Amino acid sequence: MSQDIPPALAELQARALQRLRAAVDATALPDAPALARLALASDFAIDVLVRQPELLARLRADAATPLPPPQLPADAPGEWPCLLRRYRQAESARLVWRDVVDGAAVEEILGGSTVLAETCLRLALEALEAQFAQRFGVVRAADGSPQRLVVFGLGKLGGRELNFSSDIDLVYAYEHEGESEPAPAKAGGARALHAQDYFARLGQQLAKLLDEVTADGFCHRVDLRLRPFGSAGRVALSFAAMEAYFQREGRDWERYAWQKARPVAGDLAAGARLLETLRPFVYRRYLDYGALDGLRAMKAMIAAEVARQDLADDIKRGPGGIREIEFLVQALQLIRGGREPALRRRGLLDALQALAAAGHVQAQTATALAQAYRFLRRLENRLQMLGDAQTHALPADPRTQARIAAGLGYADWAALQADLAATRKRVSEEFAALLAPRRRRDGAEGDGLAAYWQGLPEHARAEALEAAGFAQAPELHASLRDFARSPGVRDLSDAARARLDRVLPALLAQAAASAQPDMVLRRVLPLLQAILRRTSYLALLDEQPAALARLVGTLARSALLGERLAAYPLLLDELLDVRVGGELPDADAMRAACAAVLRADDTEAALDALNEVRQALSFRFALALLDGRIDAQDCARHLAHLADAVVAAVLHLARDELEVTHGRIPGGRFAVLGYGTLGGEELGFGSDLDLVFLYDAPAEAVSDGDRALDAPRWYARLGQKLVALLGVRTSAGRLFDVDVRLRPDGAKGLLVSSLASFRDYQCQRAWTWEHQALVRARAIAGDAALSADFEAVRAQVLARPRAEPGLRTDVAAMRRRMRAELDRSDAALFDLKQGEGGLVDLEFLLQYLVLRDAHAHPALLKPRATARLLEAVHAAGGLDTATYAALQAAHATLLDAGLRCTLDRRPRRSPRTPAIEQARAAICTACAGLLGTSAQAEPLA
């Protein structure tokens, strides 16, 4: 801080010190510089020290520790106002000292002001509750449980960032209706009060005790206008009435207000329950760009108020002020907080940090906004510390300006103003960028398409679509005309219709500019029809051109993703999720994500949530493949690991349900095995799951529940329940279709096999093709020890020496039979999976080599995926380098082609392109050389 201050300020300091000397023993005064800084910054603090001179010694000794709160004597309610006000003044003076003398961080001052308000609320409410209980009794619900008032703190009190001389925004509620039960009459007794009257009176008395100006001043200014229906509403509402209000009447600004809400006094546990109930009102379960409209409306009202009252120098409400930072952060929280719980922070700086960590705010921007917030809040506190006034306006008086500037370490007011102007400019720019209407201008073509849409359904003509580049313009025009006439469009609100009128021409322009205009438009109309019921998605496409462009690009490349978007619009969120373009989750992260949504008390809700996770992640993997950020092998592996995670989560649900009814099997173990493409970590989009179930339990084991079952029946029920839950259709769709025919003895065998019977079957009765299937099998969920036992059985079976001629004959014969039944190739199109030289030929070749050589090369037993099996076989000498490289390339080509066929809703048959023919040739050549198979498919014997 500048050491040179104007003479007028030096005189002011001298007078303040003189007043202190008159009130305090001169020997108790601390060093003059500290008191001089205090006198410069706060007349209020000096006044408090003069009135409470004993406080000075306490501040000299330990200003960092809050002062002990007073006891409000039950037998002397007349003393309560004085005790509360003197405590609030003393503790506030301590906070001034911490800021001005000790240089404490602004977060400490805001937090200290919050704790002070909470303490005064708690003391006052507890004293009044005891008084009311004596006069009127205690309110009891229908079940006899006592009811207490819940005091919610909103705004900065709820966010634990109360400024120095702020009012406190309170809302009163109570959990259940009921009546008070007065104590037995002493002198006429007291009458019973209904809960509504009781808690309204209690709340009014609480506000009066804190807010009323007495000879000792005030404690805290109380504002109750944020309650439902504002000043016209009841002072205290039941939880049921609160829920009904927010369901029917809740407005956008109330979402912002309740975002920071926190129970601060009374029944805190009950308050937390209500906030959890109200969470869906504040945080929607989808990306909620509609929140920006509410923010624009609030900003317009504030701007009008600023202009009307000339508040340009108001650092809270004026341009680039505190409120713009608050609204900016809160809007981003509301947009994404429903999908990302980590963003649901009450405090602004915590929320800003969470937004930056999630990638929704650039780190540099977050740092700049945090610095701006601290700067503005410190300046706001200093304005209020001067005279304990609730002001946010910059002073016009030159001497006051000089005091504020000097107190904050500036040479003069001009220097402070320069920093303030730069800070407000940065805030305004960020806030304007968030709220700027993101409208698209696509030149004359865009204008023409906008006019075309405005002319529908009666006046527009198909020629406009033809001119824009749509090939089948008459047919598409008819579809758009039907869409414009549909009830969903006719019933839109004015605001939603305005959004559609901006979004649809932009979509038409983007579609026209794409590689497949007609196809994109056909795919986008079902999606639009679906999201008309959820206008927040129209808001997303309206507010975010990047999402709209990404949507069109996705629809141009994938019919499957278009269908999924139309069926589950929640997937639109993925188009803007910052994680889409980043690193994809690994197997552990997927298991954690699936486990996190489980709810033991509601299986259907858990399956819905689980399906949303599965849909979102598979959608993300598809986008990564289409964008070229991962290859087909990585994509298939991610899909397999996602299926593993889903099965593990559903197994948890199934086990919990079964244990509720039948108890547990003591010492029992259960494991789920994945076969086929799941086991081989090469799952496709929409693939079913080949599952086999194993269990192991002590002999004669019986479950310990009321309805006991023996182990075979218990685990059979578990397997049945797992299959049923995976296939049940919920509002979010079905998780997976399951195929269990690869179990021992196939469809004739038991659904669940004991480990012993599985071992016996594989060693004694299994066919060669079943040992082939075992090559790709792996444990994907369940007991880890049983999974390890399965691995041992698998290794024992696969490593058994086999007569090579018989093995080759069995493998080749089975492949011929499968191809004859399943190959759908023709002269123009090649069946990527079952055709000769296709993926199954390669799988059979590798299975043959593993069964032939595993007894001599144990490393062949570890991999399951084709690419890794090829590596292992090559390392073991089963493939020369040239053949190995050709087969790796062939596998990558065919797998990629197959996944892209699935994404475009085409059968997995590909034109016989040079790349496909080269891949076929490599596989056919290897099979002919190693398996001795014919170059032509042989008929089924």
Image (spheres, rainbow, N blue to C red):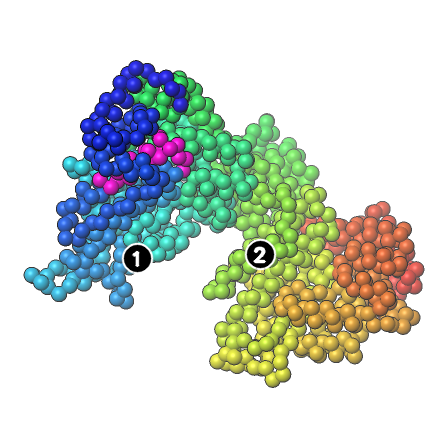
What residue do we see at 31% from left, 17% from top?
398
Residue 489 point in image, percent of width and height: 48, 44
Q: Please give the range of residues in magenta.
A: 86-107
The quarter of the displayed image where residue 116 is located: top left
Furthest residue toward left = 187
Disc 2 residue crowd, few under 14, some 14–19, many 20+, Cα 10 Å: few
Residue 31 in the figure: left or right of residue 639? left
What residue do we see at 52% from left, 77% from top?
662
Q: Is residue 532 visible?
A: no
Q: Is residue 623 above or below residue 436?
A: below
Examine the structure image and report whether residue 87 is included in the region drawn in magenta. Answer: yes
Residue 400 point in image, percent of width and height: 30, 21
Q: Which residue is mark 2?
A: 592
Q: Which residue is mark 1?
A: 175
Q: Nearer the viewer, residue 620 or 413?
A: 413
Label 1: state its secondary structure.
Answer: loop
Residue 434 point in image, percent of width and height: 48, 33
Q: Is residue 751 above or below residue 51?
A: below
Residue 747 in the figure: left or right of residue 210? right
